[in-house]
Each structure stands twice: as structure tokens, then as C-alpha cells.
């Protein structure tokens, strides 16, 4: 019971930290005023933090490598944004429309995750990475060739060539215009909505990890054969992690897109998938705090570099930062120092410290 | 390469009672019955014509020299491998076409020769993973922390502590499983297997790497487990003091075939067993 409360305390600390940062930023903005550059970055940061959390669920908790999470993001982005435009008259209140759009985006992305998961989760390791990579590209191609229109008679679809525009009735709208993507997006995303999404993602992931299903997911990651031997359906639990992750990515995609005026499918390419993976690796796999910090830092970094006119060195700096992190985290001297510090904090229980020393023999 | 092996039709002949079903068993039907069990890997016959029956509260041993096929038998019973020939009846139910997961739910739990714990989880969580199928709440209840979650988690915590108490491991509950000493890892594997509420417990070399006093303690604990949970235990072991000390029926395997079955005393004096372990007496 004591350990449980310690765990929940750490989780509430994370929620509290996010809320505190939000309140401080809002206060600072109302008193001093944030620069327009930072203001423009707030929503993308929230979206990328959510993406990093979602991918961390697959990579860190479930132990599978996915290289196609930008695909789920784009499924959510396109379906959610299209829904928001189509629902403009039905739901006039922007926050509600945003919420509905994000739920629709999440639902479509979850569906995509489920469909991809059926063949993919039978594979292990490298094969899963390759197939998810291909999936990201397939989604991009499909969205580049998809035309969706909406009028009083309902939705119209066409593929490869735009026949939708001609068929649209008076007052109809072309929602998705193939390679032109979605344009004239109503900008309804807000920083508040972004923070709420991050908090919801955190609650879902923390509560999942500390539940029956989460333990089964982590057991399957640690030892598949042993997990099956205690009666856990490994494929089912890997699927649960994958679908939840895809849904969160879809919601993040909707949020992100509705802060921009236009969006094209090429925005969510392989580079985006890798970028999100870099957030996760840099923050430490399975570490949600780390994912939040690294996503924030690496989204801010290119803009900060731009202010110093070092924009063209962005990728170079990424690489250097990653290498430094790898060296630092694998340095035995630094690790020992960290352990010593941790032990000093936990001096309260000397009996347990003795037990820990014994187990290293 | 992976052509399906045709299963020969199984002749359902009653197996001569291999081990004597203990007197205390009210229900004399065996919990596990293997009939003509066999598996081939390519052209190699790893196990052949394996017949065995285990009583409901019996402690049985499976012994034999290295490479005799003992662990393969365990893998057949738990469906890590599907048998090429023969039938496995668990409490009278044919486990043909069942997966490892289904076999576990049907009542077989096992430990592994090379320890397979969930190393990054805590000791308590390892046991709770074992309790997975007895913890009854859904994904949604877990994520939303509905009352069912708290009730079932509390129960899982209590059962986990109770199970850890068998080996006096409650104080280790918060430790990471991978950081435990070797002996404790072996004990934790047994606890995790017990958590799945089995009717048959398979122990693959439970005493490996233990010193004589630890082995003696383990023997007491295996008997204690049998007596408290009323389950059958089948164990593979090289430590003869353990096997001869607690097993009521022993089955000796050599080159995939059973060469002897019987009580410890019968096995000790069986010329074939002595030959398999020590070799033939040289004529001078």
C-alpha cells in the first residue's frame, strides 16, 4: 500500500508540474506578454509532447519500435480537421467543436492503429519497425490522393482525381483536396486545450501502466514466453497499447492542425516519425517526464537557433545533443554519482539499503 | 521446412497406472495423463512414447541424464511445442490445439530452467501478473479508476502478499525482480506460477544453484505448497536428495524414452537407471 501511494505521489507531481507551468505561462503572458514566436509554439509543443507520450507507450512500456507514428498523427489531423470544418454550422461553440474534432481524430487513428496492428503485432522487433515505417508512407500517399467534399447531401469521396468539386451542391465545401491538403482551417486550437490533452494523455498512460492491463503489457515486454505461461494473451495486450497510442497521436494531430491555416499530408513524413522517436529516446524510454521535457526542448530549439541565425545547423545540433545525452547517461562514474545521491535521499530506510547491497553480489 | 506434421491417430488405451495415486486422493482420476506423447524436431525424435499419469495431490519427479528430453516434456505439456504424436489429458480434458495461454487457464503453471522473470517489474507486480486472470476488472475501469479497480487491486495486493509469505518474501515486495539474488528469483518464479491458481505445478530444476540448506528448505516448501493448495507437483531435478526425499513417484527418461517408473526405492535399485547414470559395469 505504501509503494502504491509513492507511485501515485510521483504521478500527481507530474500532473501538478504541467499545471504549474501552464499557470505560470498564462500569468506571465497576461502581465508581461510572451513573444509572438513563443506564443505560436505553445500549441505545437503540446501536440508534440502528446505525440512523445503516445510513442513512449509503444516504445517504452510495450517495448515495440514504431517508426510510423506520424501516420497516426496525420490520420487524426485530417479526419479531425475535416470534421471540424463540416461541423462548423452544427456546433458553433469553438471549444466544443475542437473537443469533438479531437475525439473524431482519435477514433479514426485508433481504427487505423487496430487495422495496422492485426498483421503487425504478430511480428517482432525489426520487422515491426519496417512495417510501421511503410505504413507511415502509405498513409501519406493515400492522403495525398484523397478528395473529400461535404454538402447538404452528405460526404463525397474520390481517389486519385478530383471529381468531388464538380459533384458538390450549392454551398458545399471541398474538405480534403488531395495534394493541396486542407486549406482555410478555422484556427480553434488553444493552449488550454493543448494542456488539457497533455494532462488527459498523462492520466490515461499512468493509470494504464498501474493497472492489470499495464502490468500485462510490461510483462509481455520483459518476457513473452513467461507472460504466456501465466495465461496472458500477449498479442491482445500489445494491441491495446498500440491502439491507445494511436488514438492519442490522432488527437494530437487534430490539435496541431487546427492551429495552422493549411495542412498537407507531406508534413507528416518519415522525418516527423523519427523526430518523435528522438523525443522518446532522448527523454528516456518509458520515462514520461523525460518525454515531456525533451519534446518541449527539441521543439523550442530550432526556433531559438533561428533567433541566433543558426537555423541551418538545426540537424547538427540535434545530433550533437543526442550524442552528448548517450555519453552522459552511459557514463559509469555519473551513474554511480546519481545512485549515491538517490541513496542519500532514501537513507530513511537503512534495512532496505542493506538488502539492496546484498543483492548485487 | 515448416510442413505440417501429420498426427498419427491416437490409440486410446488406458495407461497402466505409472505412479501410484496416493491413498489420500478421494478422486482417483489422475490430474494429468500423457498417452504415447512424442515430438520430432526434423528427423530427431526428442521424446517418444511418453506415458505418465499423476495423481491430484501427488509430488512426482522427472529425472534423467542431460539431454534426455525432460524440459521438452515440460514444453509439450505447456504447449510451447505442439506434440507430434500422442494425447495430453488434463483432468480428463484433451489439451490438443490449446495454446500456452489456454493450457495455463486450464490449470498448468510452470517455472523455467533458465529463470524467466519480468525483470523490470517489482516483485509484487510479478506476482500480480500471475494473478492476472483472477483480477476481474476491465481496461476502462482501470484507466478511469472506478470502484472496481480499487476493490480488485486491493484484493490482488492481499493475495500477492499472502503468496509471497509462503517463502517469507513479503519484505522484498517493492524490490525490482531482476535485482534479486538467484535463489530468491527461483522462489519468486514458483510464487508467480502459484498465483495463476493451477491444479498442476511444473517445476524445472527448482533447486539449481541452491546450497544444501536452501534445498532442504525448498523441499519443505514444496510439500507445504502441495498440502495448502491441494495441487499436484511435477518436478525436474538433478539433486537426488530432493527427488528421493519428497517425490512419491519418479519417472526416468533417457534419450527421450522412459526407462523406469516407480517409487524412489524402486528407482534407486533399478539396473537400467544405474546404467543410464553411471554406465555399464565393465567385464574384467
Image (spheres, coloured by chain):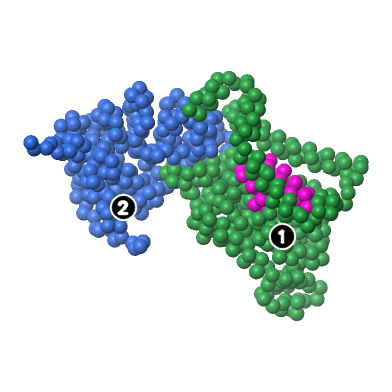
Which colour denotes chain A? green
x, y percent for residue A57: 61, 47
Specify the chain shown as blue.
B
- What predominant SS class does the magenta segment belong to? helix
Q: Are marks 1 and 2 on the same chain?
A: no
Residue wearing tag 1: A77
For label 2, the SS is loop
* Crowd around label 1: few <14 · some 14–19 · many ≥20 (10 Å): many
* Cβ atoms at labels 1 and 2 below 8 Å apart: no
- The residue lying at 57 percent from left, 40 percent from top is A211
x, y percent for residue A312: 78, 57
Q: Quadrant of residue A73?
A: bottom right
* Magenta region: A276-303
* Crowd around label 2: few <14 · some 14–19 · many ≥20 (10 Å): many
Residue wearing tag 2: B83
Q: Quadrant of residue A15?
A: top right
- The residue lying at 85 percent from left, 52 percent from top is A307
- Of A220 and A298, nearer the camera is A298
- The residue lying at 8 percent from left, 37 percent from top is B283
Residue A32 appears in the figure:
yes
Q: Is residue B140 magenta?
A: no
x, y percent for residue A333: 62, 33
For label 1, the SS is helix
Q: Is residue B52 above or below residue B226?
A: below
Amino acid at each position: 500500500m505504501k509503494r502504491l501511494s509513492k507511485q501515485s505521489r510521483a504521478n500527481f507531481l507530474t500532473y501538478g508540474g504541467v499545471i504549474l507551468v501552464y499557470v505560470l505561462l498564462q500569468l506571465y503572458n497576461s502581465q508581461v506578454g510572451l513573444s509572438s514566436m513563443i506564443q505560436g509554439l505553445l500549441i505545437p509543443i503540446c501536440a508534440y509532447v502528446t505525440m512523445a507520450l503516445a510513442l513512449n507507450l509503444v516504445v517504452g512500456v510495450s517495448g515495440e519500435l514504431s517508426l510510423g507514428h506520424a501516420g497516426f498523427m496525420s490520420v487524426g489531423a485530417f479526419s479531425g480537421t475535416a470534421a471540424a470544418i463540416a461541423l462548423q454550422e452544427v456546433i458553433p461553440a469553438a471549444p466544443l467543436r475542437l473537443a469533438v474534432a479531437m475525439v473524431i481524430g482519435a477514433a479514426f487513428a485508433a481504427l487505423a492503429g487496430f487495422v495496422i496492428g492485426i498483421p503487425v503485432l504478430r511480428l517482432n522487433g525489426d520487422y515491426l519497425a519496417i512495417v510501421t515505417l511503410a505504413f507511415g508512407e502509405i498513409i501519406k500517399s493515400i492522403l495525398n490522393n484523397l478528395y473529400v467534399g461535404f454538402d447538404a447531401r452528405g460526404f463525397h469521396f474520390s481517389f486519385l482525381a478530383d471529381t468531388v468539386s464538380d459533384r458538390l451542391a450549392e454551398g458545399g465545401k471541398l474538405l480534403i483536396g488531395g495534394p493541396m491538403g486542407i486549406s482555410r482551417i478555422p484556427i480553434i486550437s488553444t493552449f488550454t486545450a493543448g494542456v488539457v490533452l497533455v494532462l488527459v494523455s498523462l492520466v490515461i498512460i499512468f493509470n494504464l501502466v498501474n493497472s492489470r492491463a499495464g502490468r500485462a503489457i510490461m510483462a509481455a515486454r520483459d518476457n513473452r514466453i513467461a507472460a504466456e505461461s501465466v495465461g496472458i494473451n500477449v498479442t491482445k495486450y500489445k494491441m491495446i497499447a498500440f491502439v491507445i497510442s494511436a488514438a492519442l497521436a490522432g488527437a494530437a494531430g487534430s490539435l496541431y492542425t487546427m492551429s495552422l491555416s493549411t495542412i498537407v499530408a507531406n508534413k507528416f513524413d518519415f522525418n516527423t516519425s523519427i523526430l518523435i522517436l528522438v523525443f522518446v529516446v532522448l527523454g528516456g524510454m518509458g520515462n514520461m517526464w523525460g518525454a515531456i521535457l525533451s519534446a518541449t526542448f527539441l521543439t523550442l530549439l530550432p526556433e531559438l537557433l533561428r533567433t541566433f541565425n543558426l537555423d541551418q545547423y538545426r540537424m547538427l545540433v540535434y545530433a550533437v545533443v543526442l550524442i552528448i545525452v548517450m555519453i552522459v547517461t552511459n557514463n559509469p562514474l555519473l551513474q554511480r554519482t546519481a545512485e549515491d545521491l538517490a541513496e542519500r535521499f532514501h537513507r530513511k530506510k537503512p534495512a532496505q539499503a542493506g538488502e539492496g547491497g546484498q543483492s548485487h553480489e | 521446412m515448416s510442413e505440417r506434421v501429420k498426427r498419427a491417430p491416437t490409440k486410446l488405451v488406458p495407461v497402466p497406472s505409472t505412479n501410484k495415486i496416493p491413498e489420500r486422493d478421494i478422486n482417483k482420476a489422475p490430474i494429468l495423463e500423457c498417452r504415447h506423447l512424442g515430438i520430432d524436431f526434423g528427423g530427431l525424435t526428442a521424446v517418444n512414447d511418453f506415458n505418465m499419469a499423476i495423481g491430484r495431490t501427488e509430488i512426482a519427479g522427472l529425472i534423467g541424464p542431460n539431454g534426455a528430453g525432460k524440459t521438452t516434456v515440460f514444453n509439450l505439456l505447456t504447449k510451447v511445442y505442439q506434440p507430434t504424436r500422442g494425447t495430453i489429458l488434463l483432468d480428463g480434458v484433451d489439451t490438443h490445439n490449446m495454446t500456452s495461454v489456454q493450457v495455463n487457464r486450464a490449470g498448468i503453471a510452470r517455472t523455467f530452467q533458465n529463470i524467466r522473470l519480468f525483470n523490470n517489474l517489482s516483485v509484487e507486480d510479478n506476482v500480480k501478473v500471475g494473478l492476472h486472470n483472477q483480477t476481474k476488472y476491465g481496461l476502462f475501469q482501470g484507466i478511469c479508476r472506478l470502484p472496481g479497480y480499487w476493490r480488485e487491486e486491493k484484493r490482488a495486493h492481499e493475495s500477492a502478499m499472502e503468496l509471497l509469505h509462503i517463502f517469507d518474501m513479503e519484505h522484498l515486495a517493492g524490490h525490482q525482480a531482476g535485482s534479486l539474488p538467484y535463489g530468491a528469483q527461483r522462489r519468486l518464479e514458483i510464487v508467480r506460477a502459484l498465483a495463476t491458481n493451477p491444479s498442476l505445478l511444473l517445476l524445472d530444476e527448482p533447486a539449481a544453484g541452491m546450497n544444501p540448506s536452501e534445498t532442504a528448505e525448498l523441499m519443505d516448501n514444496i510439500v507445504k505448497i502441495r498440502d495448502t493448495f491441494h495441487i499436484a507437483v511435477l518436478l525436474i531435478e538433478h539433486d537426488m536428495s530432493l527427488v528421493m526425499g519428497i517425490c512419491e513417484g519418479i519417472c526416468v527418461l533417457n534419450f527421450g524414452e522412459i526407462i523406469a517408473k516407480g517409487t524412489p526405492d524402486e528407482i534407486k535399485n533399478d539396473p537400467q537407471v544405474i546404467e543410464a547414470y553411471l554406465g555399464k559395469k565393465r567385464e574384467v
